[in-house]
Image (cartoon, coloured by chain):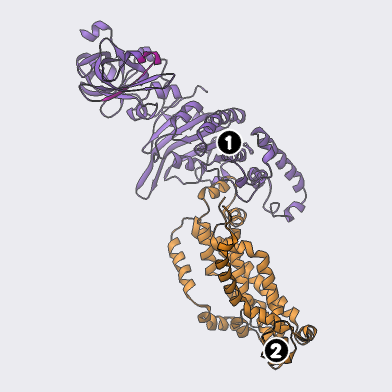
């Protein structure tokens, strides 16, 4: 992971001091273009289809060699953004730079990017060897040299074809499909087709890799192993990679950084840890994490003191948020809220034993809001269905958002503060 | 699938055989007549095998009186010339109509549909006048040029190309192909069943066409096979049916052979299942 970060939303207020290590310095993404000459830089990309604005001003930089995931619900514009980077879709406005070169007006063929498609898009009529060789053939041979049969008679073509074949074999060996070279795609399993698609992408050492949900057609077990293989492959090849997925676990496990997209905008870009622990937008907090983050209606009172259903929780709004009296939203991860001697009264409705943890579903008595707590499995004996417990969110981990879903700064209050 | 006992298939087989026989009977009769001597042709008996073989006389007479090989050669030049240009023009056009987005695409496709409704006999007179003005009567060009743009081919290929996934074409673009490379290297190879089916339709139609060659050709050495039979019939007073059938058999033989060789692909193309699997 390079020390290079960009974020999209400037936090409304500075995050509390004891969390200073969690958040990277957020910078305006547009500024980054000068810094990373060799990656991918998107500047204020807008795209509309008719009257529908699919992308509403997306700026993003991907450093050289970085693995960045674009994650978001379906219809958020992530695939359109990837197609724009690839050159398969024209922008309505904005600019795309790859390796320091403005490619906004270039065709896909001239951009030097490789793409792995969701359904692999292998050429059905060509063998594995020919499939992987196509990008090299199109780039290394002239139009005359590519003419079937006769092209092979031109001087130097045999030599070029030998080097192409050697490169194809190398790529195939790297992916473990060396034995399948003379099969057609129809004779391959899903996992093998996927590898051929990867081979076709890596064989020409492109400036950038684009992957559009490449794992979604694989079965669950294969998906997990292929994840780590793609990461390993990325390390070996070292090209900037943009990986589109709707599966947050893929995004979190594979990426150097994750960009969360919604409604045609990038809401936040950061390391997986940063996105998880320090979301700047309630929608990001809600999208990332499984089970999803608990959201409780809260109130910011005098001196910024935060209460949930008039129960103080040891959290104070800080900075800009301190002066914002009124309703707010407290978001807390399931693992950061647990039954305690005092806290928010809730009734346990249901529990799920997952082996390594226990998920307790409870309903807050006052508001009827649903809360999920992730507890150690040993706690199973202590929580019974129908029982009323007091839930205490960990104030050091609690996240505070205003009514519009923007993040507010917060700080842990000492006990005296909380009750004084 | 489990194989059914033969007895259950028998009614179906019988019905299909009967239908096949009805369709094939004239051809079989033609083969039989082509080896019979003149006096046996009009006998009341329905025997297929001749009592006295006249194979050598009948075929020898055909080969001696008309240049059959020239006619068949002309047929091949004309049919494959037409087919070559039809594919050359229709495949890129169909690709554009199926896969590219441009203003007026639907309008252009509407014209293609409209073109399907016009029978070619209605355009024959203006085409004849045009070819006459250009001084191209009695030439291969006159036989080939009017058929080089086939709206039927555009329509057929367009329907077939729409089934090709967009991502396959996008992958080709990313791999560095231009649109024409995509058409010839990716789209056409994946539409081979449709191309074969169209090729058979086209070749059969133009091999057997008599209407247009009669209009533009007067010189004997440019006769197509169908015209050749006609010429043979008028040269050799129409009564020698044995020889006439021999001539007909000779000029239809290339078609029958071609169909038998391409039969499987032909069926695939008609049922449009070529791209699966």
Q: Can residue B62 be seen in this view?
A: yes
Write the residue at 61% across / 42% down.
A188
Disc 1 target residue: A207
Residue B157, given in percent of the width and then of the height, sits at 54, 62
| B259 lies left or right of A325 | right
Above or below: residue A355 compared with residue B162: above
Above or below: residue B5 compared with residue A387: below
Write the residue at 46% across / 64% down.
B109
Mark 1 or 2, closer to the camera = 2
Tell me where residue A198 sits by quadrant. Answer: top right
Write the residue at 71% across / 77% down.
B72
Disc 2 target residue: B41
Chain of the residue under label 1: A
Q: Colour of chain A?
A: purple
Chain of the residue under label 2: B
Residue B69, given in percent of the width and then of the height, sits at 75, 78
Name the one closer to the observer, A270 or B160: B160
Mark 1 element type: loop
The stretch of residues the image draws in magenta is: A369-380
Name the one closer to the observer, A276 or A146: A276
Query: Marks 1/2: CA distance?
Result: 79 Å
Q: Colour of chain B?
A: orange
**Other residues around mark 2 within 10 Å, as few (<14) / some (14–19) / many (≥20):** some
Please say if the residues under marks 1 and 2 sit with CB atoms less than 8 Å apart. no
Above or below: residue A214 compared with residue A184: above
Residue A326, given in percent of the width and then of the height, sits at 20, 22
Residue A273, magenta (yes or no): no
């Amino acid at each position: 992971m390079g020390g290079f970060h960009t974020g999209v939303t400037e936090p409304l207020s500075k995050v509390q001091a004891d969390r200073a290590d969690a958040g990277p310095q957020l910078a305006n993404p547009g500024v980054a273009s000068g810094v990373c000459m060799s990656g991918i830089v998107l500047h204020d990309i807008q795209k509309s289809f008719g009257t529908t604005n699919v992308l509403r001003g997306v700026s993003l930089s991907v450093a050289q060699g970085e693995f960045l995931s674009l994650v978001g619900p379906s219809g958020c514009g992530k695939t359109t953004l990837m197609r724009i980077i690839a050159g398969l879709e024209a922008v309505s406005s904005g600019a795309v730079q790859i390796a320091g070169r403005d490619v906004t007006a270039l065709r896909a063929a001239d951009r030097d990017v490789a793409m792995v498609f969701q359904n692999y898009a292998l050429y059905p009529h060509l063998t594995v060897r020919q499939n992987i060789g196509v990008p090299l053939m199109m780039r290394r041979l002239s139009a005359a040299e590519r003419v079937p049969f006769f092209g092979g008679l031109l001087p130097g073509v045999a030599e070029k074809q030998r080097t192409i074949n050697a490169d194809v074999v190398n790529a195939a060996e790297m992916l473990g499909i060396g034995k399948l070279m003379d099969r057609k795609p129809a004779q391959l399993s899903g996992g093998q087709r996927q590898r051929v698609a990867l081979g076709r992408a890596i064989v020409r050492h492109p400036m950038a890799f684009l992957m559009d949900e490449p794992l979604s057609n694989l079965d669950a077990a294969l998906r997990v192993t292929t994840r780590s293989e793609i990461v390993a492959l990325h390390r070996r090849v070292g090209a900037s990679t943009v990986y589109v997925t709707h599966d947050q676990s893929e995004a979190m496990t594979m990426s150097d950084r994750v960009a969360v997209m919604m409604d045609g905008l990038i809401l936040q870009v950061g390391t997986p840890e940063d996105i998880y622990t320090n979301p700047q937008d309630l929608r990001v907090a809600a999208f990332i994490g499984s089970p999803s983050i608990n959201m409780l209606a809260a109130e910011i009172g005098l001196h910024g003191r935060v209460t949930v259903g008039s129960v103080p929780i040891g959290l104070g709004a800080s900075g800009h948020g301190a002066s914002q009296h009124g309703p707010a939203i407290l978001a807390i991860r399931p693992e950061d809220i647990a039954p305690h001697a005092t806290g928010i009264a809730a009734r346990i409705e249901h529990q799920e034993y997952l082996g390594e943890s226990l998920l307790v579903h409870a309903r807050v008595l006052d508001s009827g809001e649903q809360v999920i707590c992730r507890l150690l499995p040993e706690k199973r004996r202590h929580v019974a269905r129908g029982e009323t417990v007091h839930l205490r969110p960990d104030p050091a981990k609690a996240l505070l958002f205003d009514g519009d879903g923007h993040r507010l700064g917060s700080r842990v209050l000492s006990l005296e503060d909380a009750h004084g | 699938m489990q194989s059914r006992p033969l007895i259950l298939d028998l009614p179906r087989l019988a019905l299909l055989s009967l239908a096949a026989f009805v369709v094939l009977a004239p051809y079989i009769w033609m083969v039989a007549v082509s080896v019979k001597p003149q006096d046996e042709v009009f006998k009341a008996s329905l025997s297929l095998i001749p009592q006295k073989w006249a194979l050598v006389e009948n075929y020898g007479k055909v080969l001696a009186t008309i240049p059959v090989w020239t006619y068949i050669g002309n047929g091949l030049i004309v049919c494959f010339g037409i087919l070559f240009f039809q594919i050359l023009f229709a495949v890129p056009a169909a690709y554009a109509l199926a896969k590219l987005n441009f203003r007026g695409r639907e309008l252009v496709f509407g014209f293609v549909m409209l073109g399907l409704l016009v029978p070619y006999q209605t355009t024959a007179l203006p085409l004849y006048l045009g070819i006459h003005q250009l001084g191209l009567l009695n030439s291969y060009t006159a036989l080939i040029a009017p058929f080089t743009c086939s709206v039927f081919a555009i329509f057929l290929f367009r329907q077939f190309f729409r089934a090709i996934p967009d991502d396959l074409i996008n992958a080709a673009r990313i791999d560095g192909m231009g649109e024409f490379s995509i058409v010839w290297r990716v789209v056409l190879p994946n539409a081979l069943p449709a191309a074969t089916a169209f090729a058979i339709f086209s070749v059969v139609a133009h091999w057997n066409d008599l209407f247009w060659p009669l209009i533009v050709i007067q010189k004997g050495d440019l006769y197509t096979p169908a015209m050749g039979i006609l010429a043979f019939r008028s040269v050799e007073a129409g009564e020698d049916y044995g020889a006439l059938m021999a001539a007909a058999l000779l000029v239809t033989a290339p078609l029958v052979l071609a169909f038998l060789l391409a039969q499987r692909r032909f069926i695939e193309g008609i049922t449009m299942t070529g791209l699966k699997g």
